[in-house]
Image (cartoon, rainbow, N blue to C red):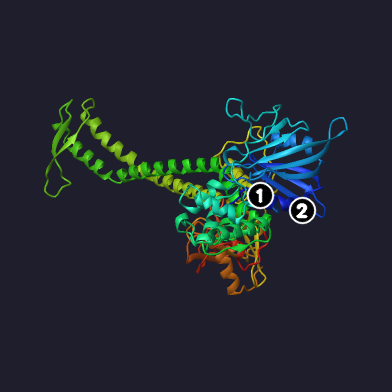
Amino acid sequence: MAFDAFFLSAVLAEVEEKCLGGRVEKIFQPSRDTVLLLIRGRESREKLLIAANPAAPRLHLTACSPENPPEPPMFCMVLRKHLSGARLAAVNQMPMERMAEFTFACTDEMGYSVQKKLVAELMGRTCNLYLLSPEGRILDCLRRVGLDESPRAALPGLQYRLPAPMEKENPMDLTAADYSRILASAGADVLSDRLMDTLGGLSPLVCREAALFAGGETDARVGTLPPDAAEKLALFFAENLRHPAPWLYTQSDGTPRQFAFCPIREYGGCARAESFAALLDSFYVLRDRRDAIRQKSGAMRKTVTNQCQRLRRKLAVQEKELAQSLDRERLRQLGDILTANLNRVERGASQVICQDFYDEDMKEIAIPLAPQLSPQQNAAKFYKDYARMKTAEKELNKQLSLGAEELAYLESVLEELNRAGTEAELEEIRQELQAGGYLRQDSGKKRMKQGKLPPLRFESTDGFPIFVGRNNRQNDELTFKLARRDDIWCHASKVHGSHVIISCGGAAVPDNTVTQAAQLAAYYAETGGGQNIPVDVTRVKQVKKIPSGKPGMVIYHTYRTVVANPYPDIRIDPLNAEKTDD
C-alpha cells in the first residue's frame, strides 16, 4: 500500500472540496482506533473516517457505516462535547508528512467563537488523534503517551508539539538538474532505495514505480541507468504529484492488493478508481469488517474450540471403554471355570491353575485372584464385572451417540462463526450458545440492542424467492416456522451448513432455480470453498426436527441429490440478491 504523504494530499483535496464549510452533525467511534465524523457539506452529507491504526493508518471519506459499540468511548464523548455543531473552517497538511490538521469554528461555554483543531498523525507506530484547544493545548487524544515513554508526550493539558520536520528533499520542488545531482551523489546503489533515502513523503511502492519508469525495472541500479534517467524522474514526479489519480491493483481472485496515486505497473497492470474515497473503501472496508468480526468472535471461537477438543478426548476414552466392554464374555467364562474348581483354590492365593473347558484342547490357564477375597467371592467378582460391562455397553453407546451429536452441533457453530459477517449475527450466535449453557449469561454488561435478523433473501433468475438461514436457530425458524410444507428445502449433503428454502407454495420450480438454490446451499456450507458439492433437495414436509436435538439438527429420508458449485463471491452472483444485512 502507498498511503504516503502525497496520497494523503490527494485525499485531503477531496475532503476539502466536499466538506469545507460543512457542520459536524454526529461523531462516532466504531473501534478503538477509528473515529467517524458525519459532516453536512455544501451539497450532501459526508462521512469522514480517521483510522489511527498503526497497522493500517488512513483518512478518507467513506460510504460505509461501521457498527458502533453500545456505549461510546470516552474520547468519542469528548469529541462530541467540543465539535458537535462545529463548522469545518480549514484543512491543512504538514509538508511531506502523513499528518492532517482540521480546524473547526466552534462556540465555547461562554458563547464566544473559538477555533479548535483535530490533528491526525498517521505515521506508523506513533499514530494518534489529538483534539486541541485554541491555545494549542491537548484537550484529549486517542492514544495517551506518558512523559517517560516518549519525548512527545500525549496527555490532556500538555502543550501539543509538532513532529520533527522531515530532513529530506521535497520532490515537488525538484527539477531534472536536481535529480542529476541526486544520481551523481553518494548513496544506495539501487535507484528506488536512493530515492527513498533522499526524497520525503513517498512510499517504497512509488519509488519502485519511479525506478521502473526511469530505469526499466524496479530494482534498477544507479550505475546502469540510461542518460535520460534524470529527465524521466522529473517527468514522473511532475506528472503524478501534480495530477494524482486513484490507482488500484487487484489480484486475479478479486482481492485488492496495492494502491497508489500513480499507475502501478510493477505487477503488470492496474485499474483507475472513481475517487480516492471509493478506492480506500474498496480496499479496506471488507477487510476491516472481517478483521473486526474475527476479533469480536475470538472469545466465542476459543470457547467452542475448547469444548470440541474436550468432547473429542471424552469420545476417545468412551470408545476405548466400549471396546473393552465387548470382551466381557471372557469374564463370564472365567467365573464358570473358577466356580467349577473352587475346591482347588487356596485362601489367600493370588492365582489358580485350572483347565479351560471352553478351549477345545482343554489347556491349562492361570486365573488371577484377589488374595483378600474368598474363592466364592472371587468367582462372584468375575460375574459382577461381566454384568457391569454389559450395562456399560448400553450406556456407552448412548453417551457416544449424544457426544457425537453435540460435537457435530459445536462444529456447526464454528462454521457459523466463520460465516458471520456482522456483529448482529455474532450476537445471535452468542445468545444461542448462552441458551445451550456453553457461555455464561451476561451479568450487567450492556450490549447493543439488536433487532431480530431476517434470513438472507435472494431471488432466482426465474423470480422465485430463496431464503438462507444465517445460523442454527435461524435454520430452525426458517424451516419449521417461516417455510410452507410444500416449499423446497436444500442443504449440503452430510456437512454443516445453512438451510435453504425456495418459496414456491407447491408450484413447479424450474431446474434453473433449483440449481441456483443448490449453489447457495453449497456456498453457505462447510465445504463452501470446494467444487462439485452434493446438495440434498426435498420438500419441507419431509424434514423433521430431531427430538430433543440441538438447534439446526434435522432428519429427512425422501430426497434427491444434485451436484453444485458454490459461487466464489456471492456479491457477484446472478441471483440479484437483496442484501438485508447491508
Residues 449 and 476: in front is: 449
Quadrant where the image shows the C terminus: bottom right
Is residue 549 shown to the viewer in this render?
A: no
Amino acid at the residue labelled 2: Glu
Q: Is residue 34 visible?
A: yes
Please give the residue where the numbered disc 1 appears in the rendered image.
8
Q: Is residue 88 above or below residue 75?
A: below
> Between residues 88 and 397, which one lies in front from this camera angle?
88
Using the image, determine if residue 453 lies above or below residue 573: above
Q: Residue at coordinates 56% horizontally, 44% vertically from top-left?
A: 55
- Name the mark on residue 17: 2
Residue at the outermost right position? 111
Q: Which mark, by number, is residue 479?
A: none
Q: Secondary structure at mark 1?
A: helix
Q: Residue at x 51, y 43 (%)?
A: 304
User: On the picture, is 175 further left or further right than 43?
Assistant: left
The x and y percentages for residue 531 are 48, 65
**Residue 419 percent coordinates (x, y):** 56, 53
Secondary structure beneath label 2: helix
The residue drawn where x is 60% and y is 59% is: 236
**224 and 6: which is toward the camera:** 224
Mark 1 neighbour class, 10 Å CA radius: few under 14, some 14 to 19, many 20 or more: many
Percent x, y of residue 534: 48, 65
Q: CA distance from mark 2 to mark 1?
A: 14 Å
